[in-house]
Image: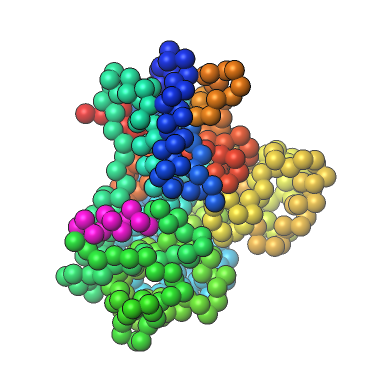
Amino acid sequence: MKELREEYISIIEELDGDLPGRRAAVDSIEESGIMAYGAPLTFSYVPDLFDSDDLAYLEQVSTTAHRILCKVIRHFLDDPDYREIFHFPPEVERLILLPCNYPQLLPIARFDLFLNEEDGSFQFCEFNADGTSAMSRDLAAAQALEQGATFREFARRHTVEHFELFDSWVEAFMDIYRSDKNAVDDPNVCITDFSESGVNSDFELFIAAFERRGIPARFVDVRALEFDGELLRDTKDGYIIDAVYRRSVTSEIMQHPGECEALIDAVAAEKVCLIGHFRTTVIHTKMIGAALYDPKTAAFLSDEEQDFVRGHVARTYLLRHDTEGLDLEQVRHNKDAWIIKPQDDYGAHGVYPGVDCATQEDWERLVDEKTDAGYIAQEFCPPYTVDIVLPEQDGDDTCKVEAWESMPGCYLYDGKFVGLYCREGQHGIIALDHGGVCAPSFKVDCG
């Protein structure tokens, strides 16, 4: 990774910054219409580059995590006593326990991690389930870079390939659907989310991928569904829905009580196949970090799996006065060592890294405010930095190389590693809505 990155930057420098390529990349993004939080996608002109050894390593890491998390979901479903460690509200637990008729416990996921490109050491940032997104952003950034002279020269020296994330999901989706006992031969598919918060560019590309396979598909806002006891339909025209690709995260559904009942009732009646099912909420919650360290979890993990957790998952505690093992005073007085997150949300909503807090007094006030208020406290892992070049020229410097904090995310479809979504940032939160950028990812010399 690191050597390939250095080679790529050296080509930019040999091309005096490749300013025409960088301008063309910016134009490409603007013309694509790919947006992130209301503005054209921000991106690095240096991609994240992975050779076959890198990818074999990330595949092993991500599939190990997937296996562990599936064990957690399975025990949550089977053991009422185990459910208690997650502190889910009754209405969320009810959704998780609704019937599901296919065996895959975690159909789609993205595991974000802080990865040291020099030695391969890493720590997970978070586990994303059904709200897993941004495939279209990675694709648009890749297509933008491919137009420049830097990429063309790098591709002359190496075999370079972008990760395919759309047709591969349709194939995985249909494999999971066909394993459902109620599957029909020619299903109608619906992608559902909240219109105002979903990544529409993702949906458009996924719909096109379904249609390439001859499978009818459309996006329907989760609030625009109706269920008559037998059929789930789009209220707009009565389109019958057999299979749902759920992108609406459970926490957002809970913020709209009474508006999403058609989907919930259809799942409860076993009249629609929901991929992924609400049971993936078990690992999407920020409480998963605490659950992985709980003795009840250790009891069903192998020694190797327990070592994996201890080596790569930050210690996490429910931010409450009565949490066993949590020293609240230590959290209050060591702000740079901690990050506070909501128990169950998505993106970077309500996330507070101590390193971003202006003063010690502000941090202590924040800790006091969030204690006993539905938050977790997690040991903070300082992200590793990588060198990047932004597409916009900075003054007279035609090739300004900057060190930014890095967070690659591993996509898994049906338990298989399929690609990455990589971001860089300059703050305690690495996210596009916190000044971050997308770095497209490529396979290099993988045969």
Front-lying residue, 368 or 263:
263
Left or right: 355 in relation to 217: right
Q: Residue furthest left?
A: 185
Is 287 situated above or below 113?
below
Range shown magenta: 203-213
Front-lying residue, 143 or 229:
143
Q: Decide if residue 191 is in sight here.
A: yes
Q: Position of residue 192 (x, y in %)?
A: 40, 66
Residue at image location 49% in from the left, 43% down from the top: 41
Residue 84 placement: quadrant: bottom right
| Residue 212 magenta-highlighted | yes
Residue at image location 38% in from the left, 26% down from the top: 148
Residue at image location 73% in from the left, 46% down from the top: 331
Q: Position of residue 340 (x, y in %)?
A: 66, 50
Residue at image location 66% in from the left, 44% down from the top: 353
Q: Decide if residue 141 is in sight here.
A: no
Q: Position of residue 28 (x, y in %)?
A: 41, 38
Front-lying residue, 382 or 41:
41
